[in-house]
């Protein structure tokens, strides 16, 4: 293909290796090479017959380079991104974009001043489970939705790398929260986020949060729960969505789940059941003649659409899918989560 975009990956660790591998296989891009501060990473690149740059300056001074994907420690994103844009390079930053709203504004300002693309790799907008729950939400099939739960549980603690270190922007809010919160903000796009209340956990790690719970209240009485834990040995549903006319559940990333909708609100079917030491009609299960059961209609999406958009922005002046305003909103939410946990208070946002 003619008019390919020449790209370099800075930071050749786990995600950097992923980007390099995928870019090298895309017909719209040409991987010129990689750079990393660790010699063993550069040696690995050479073994894989990938050109390795000797320094970041070598990358920035290479006039062939049009796009830099940054996959370094979180606290270094800002400095590298600004230098790259000032050198005339378009920039993709791995998530989280940076560690504060103030830093983010400096990065956005550099993009405006240089005219270079600056965006973030929010790849989990292309997860099938998210795409599936979003289509159901957008369809209105459950009626007015009043509750959404989004959960990811692990049982191994935080990996023994930079994710466990505060100086590198570690912890689950910045590692997994940035994904799940972005999904929620896109799912509810157009609704104002009013408040958030959050708690953090330090079960296996005392330097950074190894888990968190955030309760968000949006306009129209929508409440959203996001939970990420790393010391839970029994899982919970990936998604739970409740609306006026039905409920949906997605168990896991394999999209196992179901939908149950009301068939007849008028039919009186409540028969008391024994619950513990008493009887209840309120919590008695519905009879089958008052409900309908449906399978989850799976939605499959293609992650490469992300890089297709990057190409179209650079070559065809298209609009970027992950915008600066979206990044601002997500960063403000994460900052509010930390503040809420520190103060043990509900934080007003109105964003």
Image (cartoon, rainbow, N blue to C red):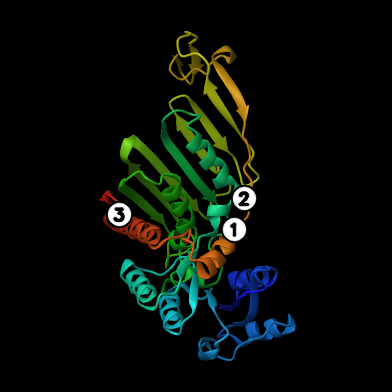
**Total marks drawn?**
3
For label 1, the residue is: 305
Q: Quadrant of residue 13?
A: bottom right
Q: Nearer the viewer, residue 27 or 92?
A: 27
Q: Earlier in the sequence, mark 3 or mark 1?
A: 1
- The answer to whether marks 2 and 1 mark residues whose Cβ atoms lie closer than 8 Å is yes
State the residue at coordinates (61%, 34%). 296
Q: Is residue 79 above or below residue 238?
A: below
State the residue at coordinates (39%, 73%). 111
State how far apart marks 3 and 2 are (Cα): 35 Å
In this picture, residue 229 sits left or right of residue 102: right
Q: Quadrant of residue 343?
A: bottom left
Helix, strand or loop under label 1: helix
For label 2, the residue is: 301
For label 3, the residue is: 340
Helix, strand or loop under label 2: loop
Helix, strand or loop under label 3: helix
Task: Report the mark closest to the observer, 2 or 1.
Answer: 1
State the residue at coordinates (60%, 48%). 128
Task: Report the mark closest to the observer, 3 or 1.
Answer: 1
Task: Report the mark closest to the observer, 3 or 2.
Answer: 2
- Quarter the N terminus occupies: bottom right
State how far apart marks 2 and 1 are (Cα): 8 Å
- The answer to whether marks 3 and 2 mark residues whose Cβ atoms lie closer than 8 Å is no
Residue 227 in the image: x percent, y percent?
46, 49
């Amino acid at each position: 293909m003619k008019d390919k975009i020449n790209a370099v990956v800075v930071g050749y660790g786990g995600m950097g290796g992923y980007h390099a591998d995928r870019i090298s296989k895309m017909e719209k891009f040409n991987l010129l090479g990689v750079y990393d501060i660790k010699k063993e990473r550069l040696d690995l690149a050479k073994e894989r017959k990938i050109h390795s740059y000797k320094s970041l300056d070598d990358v920035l001074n290479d006039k062939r380079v049009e796009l830099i994907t940054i996959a370094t420690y979180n606290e270094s994103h800002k400095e590298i991104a600004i230098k790259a844009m000032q050198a005339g390079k378009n920039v993709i930053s791995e998530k989280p974009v940076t560690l504060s709203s103030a830093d983010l504004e400096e990065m956005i300002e550099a993009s405006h001043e240089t005219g270079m693309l600056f965006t973030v790799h929010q790849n989990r907008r292309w997860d099938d489970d998210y795409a599936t729950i979003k289509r159901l939400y957008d369809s209105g099939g459950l009626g007015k939705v009043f509750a959404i739960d989004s959960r990811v549980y692990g049982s191994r603690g935080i990996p023994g790398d930079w994710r466990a270190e505060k100086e590198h922007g570690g912890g689950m809010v910045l590692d997994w929260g940035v994904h799940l919160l972005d999904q929620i903000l896109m799912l509810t796009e157009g609704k104002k986020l009013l408040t958030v209340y959050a708690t953090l956990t330090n079960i296996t790690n005392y330097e950074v949060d190894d888990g968190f719970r955030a309760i968000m209240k949006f306009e129209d009485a929508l409440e959203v729960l996001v939970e990420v834990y790393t010391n839970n040995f029994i899982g919970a549903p990936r998604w739970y969505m409740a609306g006026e006319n039905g409920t949906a559940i997605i168990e896991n990333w394999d999209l196992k789940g179901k939908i149950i909708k009301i068939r007849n609100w008028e039919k009186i079917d409540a028969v008391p059941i024994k619950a513990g030491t008493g009887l209840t009609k309120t919590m008695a299960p519905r009879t089958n003649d008052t409900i309908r059961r449906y399978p989850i209609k799976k939605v499959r999406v293609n992650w490469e659409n992300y890089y297709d958009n990057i190409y179209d922005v650079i070559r065809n002046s298209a609009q970027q899918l992950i915008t600066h305003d979206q990044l601002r909103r997500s960063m403000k939410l994460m900052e509010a989560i930390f503040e809420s946990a520190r103060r043990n208070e509900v934080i007003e946002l109105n964003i």
